[in-house]
Amino acid sequence: MQTDRESERIKIIVRDFSFYYGAQPALKGISLDVRENEIFTVIGPARSGKTTFLRCLNRMNDSIANTKRSGQVMLDGKEIFAGDIDVADLRRRLGMVFAIPVALPKSIYNNLALGPRMRGIHSKKRLYEIVERSLKAAYLWDEVKNRLHESARKLSGGQQQRLCLARAMALEPEVLLLDEPCSGLDPISTRKIEEALLELKKQYTIILVTNITGQAARVGDRTAFFLMGELIECDLTERIFTNPHDERTSDYLTGKFG
Amino acid sequence: MSPTKDRFISSILFAIASFSITALFVIGLFIFIEGFPIILRIGIGKFILSTDWSPLEGRFGILSMIVGSLCVAVGTLIVAVPLGVGCAIYLSEFASKRTVAIIKPAIELLFAIPSVVYGFVGVLFIVPFVRTHLGGQGHGFCILTASVVLGIMVLPVIVGMSIDALQAVPKVYRDGSLALGATKWQTTTMVTLRAARSGILAGVILGMANAIGETMAVIMVIGNAVVMPNSPLDSVRTLTSNIALEMGYATGEHRQALFATGVVLFVIIMILNAMTRYVTRKRIA
Amino acid sequence: MKRPHPKTQELIAKTILSLFAAIVVMTLLAIVGYVVVKGVRVINADFLFGSPKSMGREGGILPFIISTLYITVTGLLISIPLGLGSAIYLTEYTSEGWPTKVIRFGIDCLAGVPSIVLGLFGFTFFVRLLNFSWSILSGGLTVSLMILPFIIRSSEEAIRAVPSSYRDVAFATGGTRWQCVTRVVLPCALPGIVTGIILAIGKCVGETASVIFTAGTSLRIPMSMFDSGRTLAVHFYLLVRETGASDMAYGSAATLLISILVVNFFAYWLMRKFISRVS
């Protein structure tokens, strides 16, 4: 599957990873690689484990009681579930954006400064730099630069989601985990975010969960198809969409089920 | 911010949270220790079941006070439950939003009025009223008066918990009944009330506990005679008022007896609280 | 026997019930209105800031106002950290095991302890055993036990009202649990917590049974924590016992009621701000 030349550019390795809520399997034996600086899209119908998968990558599922897991997940070659891993640090390296934009009831500035402050950065100059840089990268700077101290809740849905993207980037992560970031957004906002992602992949590795297959086709370099907790197929986006190996993949892509 | 620091904070918070139960334990322990010797001397049976309360002669029987407290509690419920539950039903099922917005804060304000003010108003109005129109041995200072005063005091608890219980009934229950052609009132009595039963009952028990635990308002309107009541117009003494009245000058065994009374009160309230929890836990899945 | 038509039944029921509600409201207005109206006449600068004369039956109520303030503040200083800390533990740190169940049971029971029993305990423990004697300190400590469960409950409610998505953001941004609590949850829950504290103030001010045996009945302005002091509520009670429905009694009652009402209205206003902020 990968050549020797490509193997050193692999950011995340998942080997035979399973996850259970109680006795219910949510993920069954997932194995895949995510390359550095690519947009890796994950598609599939509802309840196929896409969000669970994403939340396992930054160990957000740790706080849920009564769960089991097996298998390996490695970031830059190091197992993320190892006992000596600093979970807070892991979550900074893997910035997450949720499906529903969550703007904290603070100013735009403070929303973005939250992460860096928790990390110990208090210099006003540095914080301002970080805020400006993140907002520019999320294509939001021009719209809010004059009202950084207004409440973030006044922004529109699309703007709030870009704010969340900026907030994730304020931590200077290595990987961006995006969980259906454009659900509920109008096409223009969606387009803006997709443009931002295409630009951002030069700097970050991006894993994008989406249930809009068109989005995967537009921005994904490689795509994985999840169904009922299993990884059915994972390949270059072009190949998956034009010539999928598995019948279930083509059924999903052609809309036979959704 | 390391994980060990977080664990440290977690332990501190746990210690803080445990304070309440520690305090409760210490309170119970102390009251018990102070009251135990007298119970040991007289015997718990005689203490609780004798009506002879003569501190100066060394006889301590609190039955009349227990009966007094119970009568007052029952009287309070007779006043407060119909009024309170009825009010709750009205506010939850029939009143307009504007009405509720005015009345609900009013009821919560009732809760904030100090008990001494209630007692004061009771002395000013209810005592003379009872005396002139109903007579009785207590000359107005009697179980009836106390019930009315405490009934009003306890209303916010019953109304509040009943409203919560009624609001917690899922809308689909009501919709189902209305869809079958029932009127709102029929729906309320046959469906909603039944579903909210346990919550309302919990509120009633809590109200009863409040009534039994109330001291100041009761002292002012109940006459405080140590007798077994024969009618609601009789003057009685409750467990709480007994403690409050005699604590100031009691010494030695007398004081111990008052502590023992406190123990009895404590136990009664614990039982009522446990009943409240039990009633609200018994939910049908 | 002919049963009334369901619609008529409903009308009758509605009328009776609305009558009940009206009775409840009327009663409140009557109690508060009467006392305030009669008492307001007595309230003037001399009354509020003057000293009591002839054993408190005349004159001013300044020492009592001050004692009430001291005891309330003492009570709050103790119960706020303990109450807030407990609430944070019960909402953010607990794993809902059996120790937590025991703690919750303890809090519920503490809430149910009658104020006279608390007064009894305060007398034995603080006044006698710890030798604090009748003092602001004893009174404050006892009162803090009284309001602790209330502060825990209202803080818990305020914290639970904070949407879990906010916490998700805090964690995903690399925060520890404590950082999540201090930087996201608490700022958001603050109005609700403060509302609870303000309502607790109201309860402190009106408290009598637990204070009378612990803080004493001195007529003087307390100069230190260890001085005895009579609160306004205690003073009012003693006045009624000794002088009945005197002007002083009405004045004290009115002062009590007005201050409690003001405190409660402030709490309501704060609560409405809270609701608009979180939704």
Image: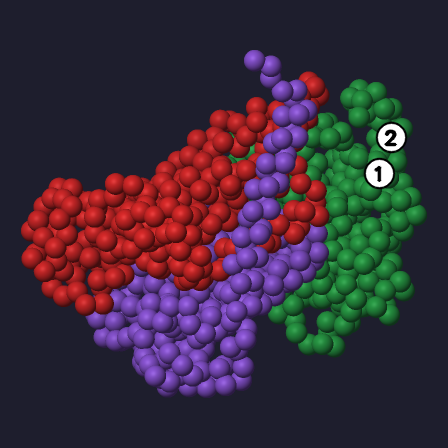
Q: Is residue B273 left or right of residue A121?
A: left
Amino acid type indicated by mark 2: Phe
Amino acid type indicated by mark 1: Ala
Question: Among all residues in the image, which is located at the extreme right?
Answer: A188
Work out whether residue C216 can be spotted.
Answer: yes
Is disc 2 placed on a helix, strand or loop? Answer: helix
Q: Nearer the viewer, mark 2 or mark 1?
A: 1
| Badge 1: residue crowd in 10 Å (few <14, some 14–19, many ≥20) | many
Q: Are the residues tagged 2 and 1 within 8 Å (C-beta)?
A: yes
Q: Is residue C117 left or right of residue A173?
A: left
Residue at 49% in and 31% down: B197
Is disc 1 placed on a helix, strand or loop? Answer: helix
* Quadrant position of residue C128: bottom left
Colour of chain C, in one word, is purple
* Quadrant position of residue C13: top right
Q: Where is residue B30 drawn, in percent x and y?
A: 22, 59
Of C47 and A191, which appears nearest the observer?
Answer: C47
Residue at 65% in and 62% down: C269
Q: Disc 2 and disc 1: Cα gap in Å?
A: 9 Å
Colour of chain B, in one word, is red
Chain for disc number 1: A
Colour of chain A, in one word, is green
Of C212 and A237, which appears nearest the observer?
Answer: C212
